[in-house]
């Protein structure tokens, strides 16, 4: 997906807020009871541990990723969402640029309208440099309060969430892009707090029912 197409999608999301549920698009929504529609976990709280399988049935645990890592990026992801797919090149670049600095990436596919075969076929055509795990019943998404694809959570080695939100602000022109995720990673790796620990996520809503 080119930059102009992605920017148009983002602009639609931000302007047409009242129409997002019908369009299958979403931004974070608050619901103190948790589960679908809940607000996401806040920076400063501990992320819930989980173990999920990828499309080849290999298990990946959050704890195993945290061991030996300086930071872990958890990205709620989709094979079909144009936002998720549109941001893949940026996330792949981030994964490559920060791998040598001790940063790992894990993509979580929580949509109940997609399954292991969808993920397997997608990755055959579009390999990713990080694992993609499948979240049956959207249980991990519910525990994180994840609402969109993409929805980013950055964890420190203790499992504490240090950044939540978007990869960037979705600006059309390069000069206007605010690289939230890169800024958060750079600050955390330097032992500082992110300039913005929480930003507004946007993308396709996580489909919790098939």
Image: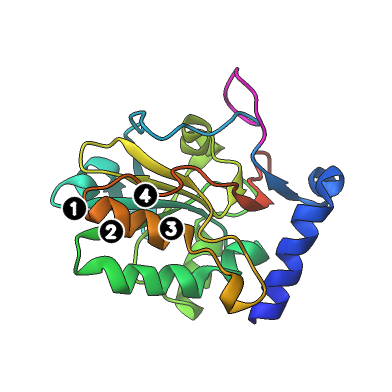
Tell whether position 119 is magenta.
no
Q: Where is residue 7 in the image (x, y as percent from the top left)?
A: 70, 70
Residue assigned mark 3: 181
Q: Position of residue 173 (x, y in %)?
A: 64, 77
Q: Do the residues labelled 4 and 3 touch (CB within 8 Å)?
A: no
Q: In this view of the protein, can residue 124 be seen by the observer?
A: yes
Q: Which residue is drawn at 30% across and 35% down?
A: 160
Q: Do the residues labelled 3 and 1 touch (CB within 8 Å)?
A: no
- The residue lying toward the viewer, choosing from 174 and 155, is 174
Q: What element carries label 2?
A: strand
Residue assigned mark 4: 53
Q: Where is residue 1 in the image (x, y as percent from the top left)?
A: 64, 79
Number of callouts = 4
Q: Main secondary structure of the magenta part?
A: loop
Residue assigned mark 1: 69
Residue assigned mark 2: 104
Q: How far apart are marks 2 and 4 (CA)?
A: 17 Å
Q: Distance between the residues labelled 3 and 2?
A: 13 Å
Q: Is residue 54 left or right of residue 38?
A: left
Residue range of the region highlighted in magenta in the rendering: 29-36
Few, some or many residues within 10 Å of mark 1 (<14, 14–19, 20+):
some
Q: Distance between the residues labelled 3 and 1?
A: 17 Å
- The residue lying toward the viewer, choosing from 197 and 201, is 197
């Amino acid at each position: 997906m080119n930059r102009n197409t992605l920017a148009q999608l983002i602009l639609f999301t931000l302007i047409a807020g009242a129409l997002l549920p019908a369009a299958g698009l979403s931004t974070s929504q608050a619901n103190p009871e948790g589960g679908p529609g809940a607000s996401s976990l806040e920076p400063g709280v501990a992320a819930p541990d989980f173990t999920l399988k990828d499309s080849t049935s290999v298990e990946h645990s959050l704890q195993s990723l945290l061991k030996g890592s300086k930071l872990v990026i958890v990205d709620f992801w989709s094979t079909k969402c144009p936002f998720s797919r549109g941001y893949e090149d940026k996330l792949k670049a981030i994964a490559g640029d920060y791998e040598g600095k001790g940063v790992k990436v894990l993509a979580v596919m929580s949509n109940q309208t997609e399954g292991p075969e969808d993920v397997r076929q997608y990755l055959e055509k579009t390999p990713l440099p990080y694992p993609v795990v499948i979240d049956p019943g959207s249980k991990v998404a519910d525990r994180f309060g994840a609402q969109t694809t993409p929805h980013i959570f950055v964890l420190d080695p203790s499992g504490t969430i240090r950044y939540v939100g978007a990869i960037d602000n979705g600006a059309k022109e390069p000069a206007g892009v605010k690289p939230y995720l890169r800024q958060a990673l750079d600050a955390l790796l330097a032992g500082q707090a992110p300039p913005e620990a929480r930003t507004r996520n946007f993308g396709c809503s996580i489909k919790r029912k098939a």
